[in-house]
Structures are given as C-alpha cells and as structure tokens.
Image (cartoon, rainbow, N blue to C red):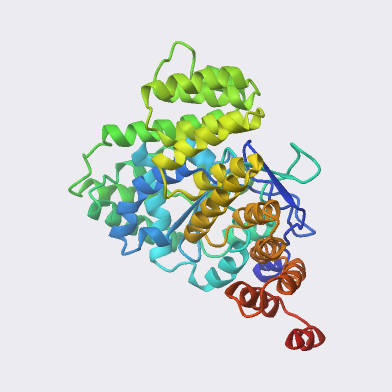
Amino acid sequence: MSLRKALGGVRAGCAALALTGLILAPISAAQAADDDESISIIRDTEIEHILHEEADPVFVAAGLDPKAVQIHLVSNAELNSFAAGGQQIFVYSGMILETKNPNELIGVIAHETGHVAGGHLARSGDMIHHALGPMLISVGLGILAALAGAPGAGASLIFSAGYFGELSALGFNREQESRADQAAATFLDKAGISGRGLVRFFDNFRYQEVFDDEKKYPYFRTHPLSDERIEALRVRVTKQAHYDDVDSPRALALHAIMKAKLEGFIDGASKVLADYPLTDQSFPARYARAISLYRANDSDGATKAIDALIVDQPKNPYLWEIKGQIAFDSGHTKEAEAAHRRSVELEPDAPLLRINHAQALVALGAPDQLNEAVLDIRHALAVEPESPLAWRLLSEAYDAKKDPGMARLAAAEQNFYLGQLLEARTFAYNARQLLQKGTPEWRRATDIILASKPTPDQLKALGGG
C-alpha cells in the first residue's frame, strides 16, 4: 500500500466524547479499512517534561528549537522509536522501560534527532503532518475520553497500521542510519552529554542482527544494526571530551520516576509489585504502587498512598493531579476540583492540568465554576490550539452556561481538528445562525465553513447569510 493511500485511509470517528478520570485516550476509532493493528498516542505532562528536560540540550545542539520539536509517547510495549516529518519524534513506552538509564534513552533520541536535522524525512513531512495534525489529541495518562452513552468504554487514538508500516519503508537505509549515528555523536558532545549510552544500547541488542526481520524488534527492522556501524560509532564517541561523563543524580531520579509512572499505569498489579516490592520505600516504587492501586480501582488505597507522597513532596503538581483523578473517578468531584486546582497553582502553564481542573469545574456546574472552566480551557487552547479534547470540553462548558452559539462553535472547532469536515460544517452553520453577525466568533464559524469544502450551493447560501 502506498503512503498516500495509507494516509488517505485514516478517518476520524465522530462519536461525542465525555471525560472521566482514567487512562489513555479513546478519542477516535479511526483506521483504514484494511488495517488489522493500531497504536495509541498518550499524553502525560510529567513524562513529557522529563523527556524534554533530557532531550532539549540535544535539540539545541542540533540547531533545532526545542519548542518546535514534538516528542510523542506511544503506548506500546515494543522496543521502538522513529522520527517523522515536521520535527516529530515518536518514542514507545517499551523503549523507555527498556533503557537502563537516561544516557541510553537520550542517545536513542539523539539518533532520531539526527534524522530530523538531516532532513531524512523531508519529502514525506507534509503528508505526515497533514495526517497527524488533526489526530494528535491532548489527553493525559489520567484522562479517559469515553464514548458518550457508554461509560468506561473507549478505544485508543488509532492511526493506520499501514501508514506506520509505510513509514518504516520510507528511508531508514543503512547510509542514513550511519549518518544519524554520527550526527547524534556530534549533538551529544556539543550538549556536554556522553555518547556511551547510545553505543551501550546498540551493544545490548547486537544479537538482533542475526534475526530474520519478522523476529526482530520493530526498532531494529527500521534501524538495521551491523558490527561495522556499532564499531564506527564506538570509535567516534570514545574520543569525545564527554565520553566519561555520567548521568546526574537529578537525571537518574527523573528517569526512575518516568519508568515507575509508566509501569504503574500500563502494567498489572502483580508486575508492579514484582518490580517494586513493598520492601522498596523509594519514591519511584511508592509512586508506581500508588498508581497501580488506582488502576486496580482501589481508590481508598490509592488516595492513602498518594497522600503519603504529598506529605513528602507537597509542591509536586503531578501528585495533586493524580489525587484529583482518583477523586473524580470515584465520584468525589469537590475533592477532585480542589486537588486539580492545587496542581494548576503549582504548574500553571500545563494545558493538561488546566483541562483536568476544567473537567471538574464543569461537572460541578455552578455559574462561577463554569466561567472559571472556560478560562482554564482557553488558557490550555492558547498553548495547544488544535486540541479536540479541549474544544469538546469548551463546548460542554458553554452548553451548561446556556450559550448555544458558542457551544456549537466549539463543537465545530473540535470536529474541524479531528478532520470531520461534514460535522464541522454542520456545527459551524448552526453557530453562525446563533452568533451575532460580524463578531469574531461569527467570522470564525464562517471560516470553518469555507475550509470544510462546501458545495457551490452551500457557498451561495452562505453568501445570503
């Protein structure tokens, strides 16, 4: 299947969404007709901050603006990562959990940065960005957008498996891999980071070279290893000034927290207890066990565990975020609102934390709370204007405020960014009839209609409105 065909087959679902306090994002059930697999993009403010803290010096060394480079976290146990057009890097949760230290992970990200900075994906970038743009929904590990009318049910954010299979064939040839290796070595040294981790990571999986493709990890199907490639990289990095540098205590601590959080959310309780036994009283171990209790629907146990962590770290916004998620999911909306408010106070510029707080405010539903929810959502949209989840919640807030024009405009925005142009046009037409003519909101509804491929008759009718 061609890349263009695969991209053309990606379709967004049109089910309405409701927010609850769980894991992953069932925003759309979109896939090509001939797909038999899917992958999930998940969002978590804490993990994203850790990844950028590790990777941003490399991006700067590569001449990239860290704010322009998007690191997407894929919920998948496979060992894999890849770069895509538009300065996008995808890292599988399995890759993070497999790396033994920050230096190994940053080495892998530096390699992908080599592909981005080298323009190895430039020809496909426009198509990839066009497909991903409307589909990357802003949801947290602690937010499940369940299908309306079916609480607790949902499907993850799905992309065409054929599309990702085609990405693998786009150009990860051995020459580009070697160039990306050498670029990674340059960027790491310029950033004051050892290249030892990247070599060690490749060494750990050197045995993959002898496997048939179907038996290899996906990463090594698209990033073919060879003794010559590993040795060339080793020779380069061992001569660099920072080769003997080690991870800082802070980097090691953050990496351990990130792995613990992922395992707590993704793995079952037995796996979490095996890796983080009760005898381990470190922060990451207690964090993983607390999240695992939450995922096992033990809200009382999870709340007690999180409260104990908050005693130790009262200014940790992510502990307050999870406390709020637990409370919201167990029906304690006032307690959820208070916890999420505290998380926003501690991390005011994080869109997902704002959305969490707004979700609780909308559920409470008092006029002042709805007004505050709108402000929270608008703040989130100022940072991530293409977030369909935020637009959906804004529509709910305006609907509760008895403002149908703005509610329909927000619904039009949501559907527009999901790529559901027919639904976007319908909501925009309705909004246009309810909004005051000539206002910025009325003009925005008109813009959405014009951008949604209206028919000549529809354009004619628009001119009359």
Q: Splitting the image into 4 quarters, where does residue 141 fall?
A: top right
> 31 or 365, which lies in front?
365
Tell me the quarter of the image containing the C terminus. Answer: bottom right
Residue 185 falls left or right of residue 227? left
Residue 271 falls left or right of residue 12? left
**Residue at x 64%, y 23% (from the top left corner):** 296
Q: Position of residue 421 (x, y in %)?
A: 73, 70
In the displayed structure, 13 sits above or below 316; it is below
**Residue at x 60%, y 62% (from the top left corner):** 132
> 268 or 391, which lies in front?
391
In the displayed structure, 227 sits above or below 429; it is above
> 22 or 360, which lies in front?
360
Q: Position of residue 96 (x, y in %)?
A: 47, 39
Q: Position of residue 295 (x, y in %)?
A: 62, 27
Q: Splitting the image into 4 quarters, where does residue 430 fall?
A: bottom right
Task: Report whether residue 265 is seen.
Answer: no
Tell me the quarter of the image containing the N terminus. Answer: bottom right
Instruction: Return the residue found at the far left.
Output: 241
Q: How many numbered discs sit on the rendered protein?
A: 0
**Residue at x 50%, y 33% (from the top left corner):** 339
> 85 or 178, which lies in front?
85
Q: Position of residue 148 (x, y in %)?
A: 77, 46
Q: Splitting the image into 4 quarters, where does residue 309 fall?
A: top left
Task: Report whether residue 409 is seen.
Answer: yes
Instruction: Return the residue found at the far front.
Output: 367
